Image (cartoon, rainbow, N blue to C red):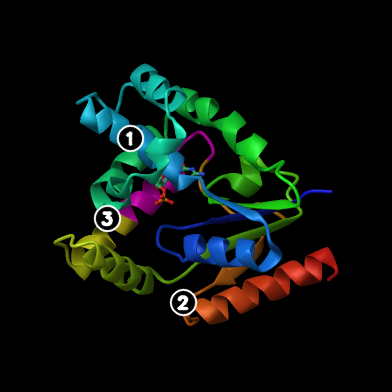
């Protein structure tokens, strides 16, 4: 039997690090689905295509190869913002659906993190987590991360980008960011990564009866 753990949440809520740690704990495979949207946007940026063109975006999504997902350029704030612009297009989401659903079938289990995993990609997931934190805490975290990549930014800029990104992700017509009705909410504002991981594992163990 294969298990699926769905982790959704806001920008810089800590879901990526949490996803990796949870996957390592249970011996499951991990997929950061944001990379699919980032790689699609980055391919379009390199080709100087219009991000608001759904057909061009869908072609870019369908043409992704595994290597494109590991490009360090995907981590930048600009690519993240572009990713949320192409993520509004229904044909883009459709082009990326199968890859994600297939990944979720991997044995003995898979952890996927994103925005619509518990609601659209894996509505039957064994455990769903919805991760969030106060905006100023998330802005500080993301600022540290971007500075580590050498990006010239500030906490104020990151906070403004974060508010814009969350609002675009939550308000889009197709697969908006929201907690599934059966998701367990995890607020990481006052938790470090060890604390957040322990809290997530406690929820998952309880649901899986371990
Ligand atoms: O998580 P990350 O910041 O890498 O995601 C970049 C963008 O990709 C998000 O802001 C969102 O618009 C989009 N995304 C999505 N659905 C997912 C994962 C990411 O729409 N499952």
Residue at 19% x, 26% y: name it.
48
| Part of the protein shown in magenta | 163-175
Q: Earlier in the sequence, mark 1 or mark 2?
A: 1
Q: CA distance from mark 3 to mark 1?
A: 17 Å
Residue at 42% x, 29% y: name it.
64
Q: Quadrant of residue 155?
A: bottom left
The residue that label 2 is drawn on is 189
Within-10-Å neighbours for mark 1: few <14, some 14–19, many 20+: many
Q: CA distance from mark 3 to mark 2?
A: 18 Å
| Residue 132 location (% of width, % of height) | 50, 66
Horizontal side of 172 relative to 149 (left or right) equals right
Q: Quadrant of the C terminus?
A: bottom right
Q: Earlier in the sequence, mark 3 or mark 1?
A: 1
The residue that label 3 is drawn on is 161
Residue 172 in the magenta stretch? The answer is yes
Residue at 39% x, 53% y: name it.
166
């Amino acid at each position: 039997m294969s298990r699926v753990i769905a982790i959704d949440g806001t920008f810089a809520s800590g879901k990526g690090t949490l996803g990796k740690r949870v996957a390592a704990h249970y011996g499951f495979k991990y997929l950061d689905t944001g990379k699919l949207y980032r790689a699609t946007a980055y391919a379009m940026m390199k080709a100087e295509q219009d991000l608001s063109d759904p057909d061009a975006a869908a072609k870019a999504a369908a043409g992704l190869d595994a290597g494109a997902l590991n490009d360090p350029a995907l981590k930048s704030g600009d690519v993240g913002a572009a990713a949320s612009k192409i993520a509004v297009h229904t044909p883009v989401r459709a082009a990326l659906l199968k890859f994600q659903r297939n990944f979720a079938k991997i044995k003995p289990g898979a952890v996927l993190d994103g925005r619509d995993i518990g609601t659209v990609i894996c509505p039957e997931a064994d455990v769903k987590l919805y991760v969030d934190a106060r905006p100023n805490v998330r802005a500080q975290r993301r600022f540290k991360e971007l500075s580590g990549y050498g990006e010239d930014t500030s906490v104020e800029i990151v906070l403004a980008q974060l508010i814009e990104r969350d609002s675009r992700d939550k308000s889009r017509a197709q697969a908006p960011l929201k907690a599934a009705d059966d998701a367990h909410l995890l607020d990481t504002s006052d938790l470090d990564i060890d604390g957040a991981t322990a809290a997530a594992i406690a929820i998952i163990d309880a649901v899986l009866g371990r």
